[in-house]
Structure formats: C-alpha cells, structure tokens
Image: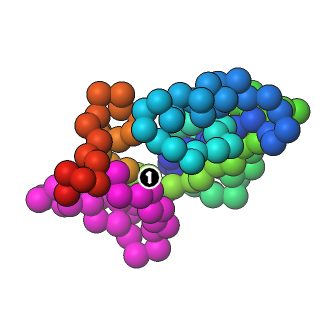
Amino acid sequence: MFKVSVYVTPKSGISDPQGATVERALPALGFEGVEQVRVGRFITLEVDGAEEEVVRRDVDDMCRRLLANPIIEDYYFELTASGPGAAQMSVDGDIVLPSDAALRIAGEHAGSPWTAADPFAHRESESEE
C-alpha cells in the first residue's frame, strides 16, 4: 500500500486568475514582496500495490488521464509506503520512521494551525518582540 500526494499547478504562461487574486490580497494582510503566486490542487490517494514502479506508473497514468489536464497543467507526485513496515506510532505519541524513509521539511509553521493562510491568525510585529 502506498500513500500518494499529487500536486497540480497551472503551467507557466497559463493564466491563473486565482493566483493573481491571492497575490493582490497579500499586501492588504501585511505580506509585502510576494510575487508569482500560482494556485493549484493537492490530491491524496492510497493505492494498493506491492511494487513501487508499478504503482508509480499507474499514478502517472491517473494524472495524465484524469487528475490533471496536461495541456494547461503541470503535476508531480510523491509516493510513501504505508502499512506494515512503514511509519509507526510509538506509545508516547512520537512517530517512528524506518531508516530509509524520505523526509520533507515544510518550514517552521508547517504543523501549526496558525499560519498566514488563516485570516484570523495573529501575526506579531517585530516591535512586539
């Protein structure tokens, strides 16, 4: 079994009205200097299969045929093995990963519900420190 994360974004040169709207709104929220905002989709799947190469080929086919429009969108995906032998939860709640697990660092606020995407989040100014 594999967990799959698919990322779909408009190709460069393709109009992205949603990205343009976000880019225009960010300065009003106090975020200056943000450019080239592209808004896409994030799709998660669980795919049954034992061989990674077969699952990878099937997911690529899913993306080309349904999940993305290859004419106007780019896509990429990541596979993570799940089930026996994959990440396990320890008794104290820590995640224990196998030594060959690939990790992706998402930034200091990745696990926080209080991010810039939350319009009700309080952003401390530098003068408050």
Give the x, y percent position of residue 116.
39, 39
* Residue 88 vertical position relative to residue 34 in the rendered view, above or below: below
Boundaries of the magenta span: 84-109
Whether residue 18 appears in this view of the structure is yes
Q: What element carries label 1?
A: loop
Q: Residue at x 28, y 34 (%)?
A: 121
Classed neighbour count for the residue bearing mark 1: other residues with Cα under 10 Å, few (<14), some (14–19), many (≥20): some
Which kind of residue does numbered mark 1 sit on?
Ser
* Residue 54 vertical position relative to residue 61 in the rendered view, above or below: below
Q: Closest to the observer: 126 or 46?
A: 126
Q: In which quarter of the image is the C terminus?
A: bottom left
- Which of the 4 image quadrants contains residue 58? top right
Give the x, y percent position of residue 3.
50, 46
* Residue 62 vertical position relative to residue 33 in the rendered view, above or below: above
The colouring scheme, among rainbow, by chain, secondary structure or one colour, is: rainbow
Give the x, y percent position of residue 11.
80, 39
Image-based side of 114 in relation to 107, left or right: left
Residue that lies at the very extreme toward the left in this rendered image? 92
Q: Which residue is drawn at 64% across and 31% down?
A: 19
Residue that lies at the very extreme toward the right in this rendered image? 71
Magenta stretch: includes residue 86: yes
Image-based side of 121 in relation to 47, left or right: left
Q: Is the stretch drawn in magenta largely helix, strand or loop?
A: loop
Q: Closest to the observer: 85 or 28?
A: 28
Image-based side of 43 in relation to 70, left or right: left
- Which of the 4 image quadrants contains residue 97? bottom left
Name the residue beneath numbered marker 1.
82
Q: Closest to the observer: 44 or 16?
A: 16
Whether residue 59 appears in this view of the structure is no
Magenta stretch: includes residue 15: no
Q: Which residue is drawn at 47% across and 42% down?
A: 31
